[in-house]
Image (cartoon, rainbow, N blue to C red):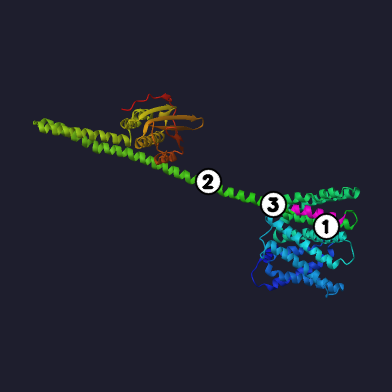
């Protein structure tokens, strides 16, 4: 309900005159109740005035002025003071107008959402300081009637200002905390336990002041220093409640004669320490909210990361299945081509050979020889295509032999590119997916080397290392060395075919430029059977 009252006070919608009239009556009654309890240390109605002006929009300030003027009017009539003359307008209207002008300049016509940042707390405190400074000369001019020197006049003016300042610190932050954040002042939060400990410490200091009144300023700082701890631990709401509790205890001790300290010193220490505690409390609360928001953001990002990781795992699984289907499709296509075209071409070659027996003239013989040579070329082309789809050596002789002496070397030899290989670890013990991935990656790099037309040599290094209880990892380095003395070398580009294979194998793909070439590095986990590792380098075969 209190929080809803704060929101009602900030609303700028037209109408609801009954609510604002009720607020003016409540303000008048609060004024009449606070004036008698205002002691020599503070003027509590100044805190009420500042809090209401800070909460209420400027278009509703007329109701606040009406409530304060009505309170002054009733007090003036009750005390028998005259209404005519400069005193009543100066006391009833001038302070409110000064405060309203200061708040309007610093805050603007619309109320701020809350005291959730040190800047807004500083604005509130600055508004109180400027309002007290502007009001004190006016009040002194009409209330201080006894003749006094210039020094006494300045001291009297400052006394009015100190009273307003301490009254603001005593009431305005506490009232704002009650209206805006009542949950922060509940006993279960521990704020009153901290305030009780601070009061115990302050009473001990006040006892020392009674025994040893000499170092009054230093001991007063120690008495009010726990306000910083309360502000840091409990926010500005806790600091506001602590200021009110310590202020009331100091007022009670001073009124009873147990605290023999100048009122001005008490006011200054309370104003300085209390203002600092409020700013520190606002900063600590803002930092705490920032940490909570950051933690919540981290949790949201972690949830998104987990979701993305799950999607990435599903994507890798889909890619692995697609790769397996592609390998299986290429294997089946190779078998079908060999069965359909291979047998047909073989039968055609047989028919041509049989036709030699029936042809006796020289022209027919030359024609058949030409046809038989074309059939042989078709057979060679078919065998090359079948080996590109699925080299039989990969299943019959293993990965090492296929890479050293298989179709990839033939392609590089035909392109005039040197080929050098090095293997380490149980390479031939890789599972079928690992062998297929390595071969297809090497095939993509070989095609890239042939396409660039500036590669002089391709160096391959494959290392399979067991990692204890974890799955072994295969590391494949493919170095493309360019021909020397090139005017312009091609820029390295990642190959999509390698990216797809690496994604399917849950691996990593890095492309790095070399001094005269480029290096494709692929690292992925794989399953390997126990077997004898092949260590060393294969002798390079010169390109034909």
Question: Residue 193, percent across and down?
Answer: 77, 51
Of 224 and 449, nearer the camera is 449
For label 1, the residue is 248
Circles 2 and 1, Cβ within 8 Å, touching? The answer is: no
Tag 1's secondary structure? helix
Q: Position of residue 17 (x, y in %)?
A: 69, 73
Give the class, few, some or many, for how many residues have Cα within 10 Å of label 3's Cα (few <14, many ≥20). many
Earlier residue among tags 1 and 3:
1
Quarter containing the C terminus: top left
Which residues lie in the magenta part?
262-277
Residue 114 sits above or below residue 206 on the image: below
Say if the magenta span includes residue 276: yes
Look at the image and tell me whether residue 495 can be seen: yes
Magenta span: chief secondary structure: helix
Residue at the image position 46 percent from the left and 45 percent from the top? 314
State the SS at label 2.
Answer: helix
User: What residue is shown with label 3?
Assistant: 283
Q: Residue sitting at 48 percent across and 46 percent down? A: 311
Residue 525: image x %, image y %? 46, 35
Q: Which residue is labeled 2 in the image?
A: 306
Looking at the image, is 12 positioned above or below residue 246?
Answer: below
């Amino acid at each position: 309900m209190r929080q809803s009252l704060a929101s009602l006070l900030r609303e700028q919608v037209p109408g609801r005159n009954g609510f604002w009239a009720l607020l003016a009556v409540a303000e008048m009654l609060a004024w009449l109740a606070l004036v008698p309890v205002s002691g020599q240390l503070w003027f509590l109605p100044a805190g009420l005035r500042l809090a209401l002006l800070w909460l209420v929009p400027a278009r509703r300030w007329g109701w606040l002025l009406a409530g304060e003027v009505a309170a002054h009017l009733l007090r003036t009539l009750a005390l028998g003071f005259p209404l005519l003359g400069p005193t009543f307008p100066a006391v009833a209207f001038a302070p409110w107008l000064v405060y309203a002008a200061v708040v309007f300049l610093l805050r603007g016509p619309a109320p701020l959402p809350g005291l959730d940042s040190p800047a807004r707390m500083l604005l509130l405190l600055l508004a109180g300081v400027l309002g007290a400074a502007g009001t004190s000369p006016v009040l002194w001019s009409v209330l201080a009637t006894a003749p006094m020197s210039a020094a006494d006049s300045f001291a009297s003016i400052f006394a009015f200002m100190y009273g307003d300042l301490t009254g603001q610190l005593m009431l305005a932050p506490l009232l704002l905390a009650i209206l805006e954040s009542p949950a922060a002042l509940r006993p279960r939060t521990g704020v009153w336990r901290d305030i009780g400990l601070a009061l115990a410490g302050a009473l001990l200091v006040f006892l020392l002041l009674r025994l040893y009144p000499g170092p009054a300023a230093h001991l007063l700082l120690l008495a009010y220093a726990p306000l910083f701890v309360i502000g840091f631990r409990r926010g500005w709401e806790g600091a506001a409640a602590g200021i009110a509790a310590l202020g009331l205890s100091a007022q009670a001790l001073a009124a009873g004669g147990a605290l023999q300290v100048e009122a001005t010193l008490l006011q200054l220490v309370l104003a300085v320490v209390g203002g600092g505690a409020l700013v520190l409390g606002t900063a600590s609360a803002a930092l705490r909210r920032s940490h909570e928001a950051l933690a919540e953001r981290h949790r949201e990002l972690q949830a998104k990361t987990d979701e993305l990781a799950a999607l990435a795992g599903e994507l890798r699984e889909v890619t692995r299945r697609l790769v397996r289907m592609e390998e299986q499709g290429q294997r089946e296509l190779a078998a079908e081509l060999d069965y359909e075209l291979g047998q047909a071409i073989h039968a055609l070659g047989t028919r041509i050979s049989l036709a030699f027996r029936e042809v006796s003239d020289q022209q027919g013989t030359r024609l058949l020889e030409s046809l038989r040579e074309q059939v042989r070329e078709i057979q060679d082309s078919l065998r090359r295509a079948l080996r590109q789809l699925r080299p039989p050596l990969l299943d019959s002789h293993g990965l090492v032999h296929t890479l050293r002496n298989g179709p990839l070397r033939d392609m590089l030899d035909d392109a005039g590119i040197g080929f050098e290989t090095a293997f380490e670890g149980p390479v031939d013990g890789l599972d079928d997916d690992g062998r297929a991935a390595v071969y297809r990656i090497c095939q993509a790099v070989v095609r890239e080397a042939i396409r660039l037309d500036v590669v002089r040599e391709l160096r391959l290094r494959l290392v399979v290392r067991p990692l204890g209880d974890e799955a072994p990892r295969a590391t494949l380095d493919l170095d493309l060395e360019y021909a020397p003395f090139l005017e312009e070398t091609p820029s390295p580009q990642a190959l999509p075919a390698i990216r797809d294979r690496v994604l399917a194998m849950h691996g990593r793909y890095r492309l790095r430029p070399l001094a005269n070439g480029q290096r494709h590095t692929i690292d992925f986990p794989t399953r390997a059977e126990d077997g004898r590792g092949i260590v060393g380098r294969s002798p390079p075969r010169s390109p034909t």
